[in-house]
Image: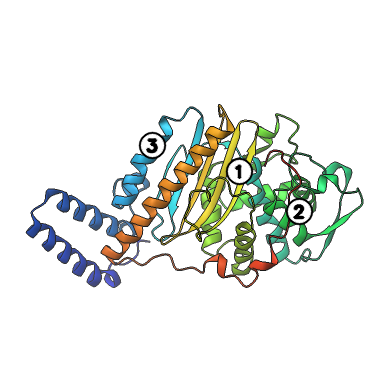
Amino acid sequence: MRPKLTAFHSKFQKNCCSLCYTAKNVGDSRAVRFVIAIIAGMLVPFLGVSAPAQAMLAPPPMQSLRAALHKMVVRFPASTAVEVMDLGTGYHIGYNAGAVMPAASTIKVPVMVEVFAQLEAGRFQLDHRVTLLAGDKDYGSGELCDAAVGSSYTVDELLDKMIDISDNTATNMLIRLVGLSSINQMMYHLGLDQTHLRGYVRTDSWAVRQALQSSPADMVRLLAMMAKRELVDGWSSNEMISILEGDTINTLLPQPLPQGIAIAHKTGSFFDTLNDVGIVYGDDPYVIAVMTTHLPSLDMGRAFIRSLSLLAFQHEARMAAWRNLTGISAFSETNGAESPDLGYWGHGTNSSNGPR
């Protein structure tokens, strides 16, 4: 059912009249086109238009971001998929956003979601201890690969290490705890059609590319639900954001952002692949997912993701100005950085220089 226009009509009419009056008196055709784009963007959420129509009627900053992003991606000599979603309006733009890509360690976000789902269901508690088995060990990233078989760790310790230092052994221990099939069923239930975990994390095999897969569209959907406190439940969403804000590998999406900008994110890399997905809490919060593979070099991938991150941040800042002009409210959910539990997470250290 489409939302009624009555509650929106008065404010919309006032803004439209003011904008049109200004454009008419200025006599600038560019101003008129800008006003038309604003009015169209204000109407989209209330008209239930299709996705292609919505893309055409996106706010000017999102249209500009789409054009700049496409220009940047088509010139990049690697397989690339991107999506950016403005959390306040739900507008999203991308390039190959639905493409199935090697997920690398970004698959650890879905693993974390299922852990919290089972926590909420009462199957175990955060202080439940999991014993390290020889088959859990993966030497690609982390420190638990060097721990003695038979050592035990609490669920919260494993969550922290899985995200904060991208510990593959901790990840395998959590996968074993909750079950591969449960993780995949949860992703299917959430509408993530391209996200699949077909085995444990084994970075010594090329098959890891097929074993861990997702898409930017899936990751943006998952993180948007988390940002809106709709993933599992409000408490779980808040804790997951806090954990993601503790990620110590900040060389991709966070690197070009101004100091003090909070970002809840997870990186992923191996061989010829670099990914980063996250929620960026700027003046206009947004979700971004960038996945690259078949890279000529990882340094080239890092430079590309950093440039794209800065591009998205700059255009989202313009979205904040567009909101002020149109009177549309900004995304108002609590910033994860304000969580009272933030200090509880993020105490790991990394002893490996391997793929993350």
Residue sitting at 81 percent across and 49 percent down?
A: 144
Q: Which residue is drawn at 51% across and 36% down?
A: 99
- Up-down: is 81 above or below 60? above
167 w.r.t. 281: above or below: above
The residue pinned by badge 1 equals: 195
Q: Name the residue under label 2.
A: 178
Q: What element carries label 3?
A: helix
Give me the C-alpha separation between circle 2 and circle 1.
17 Å
Q: Can residue 193 be seen in this view?
A: no
How many labels were placed on the picture?
3
Please give the residue where the numbered disc 3 appears in the rendered image.
Answer: 70
* Position of residue 153 measured from the top left corner of the image (x, y, whole percent): 83, 58
Q: Is residue 281 left or right of residue 247?
A: left
> What quarter of the picture does the C terminus occupy?
top right
Marks 3 and 1 sit apart, C-alpha to C-alpha, by 24 Å
Disc 2 vs disc 3: Cβ atoms closer than 8 Å?
no
The residue that appears at 55% across and 45% down in the rendered structure is 252
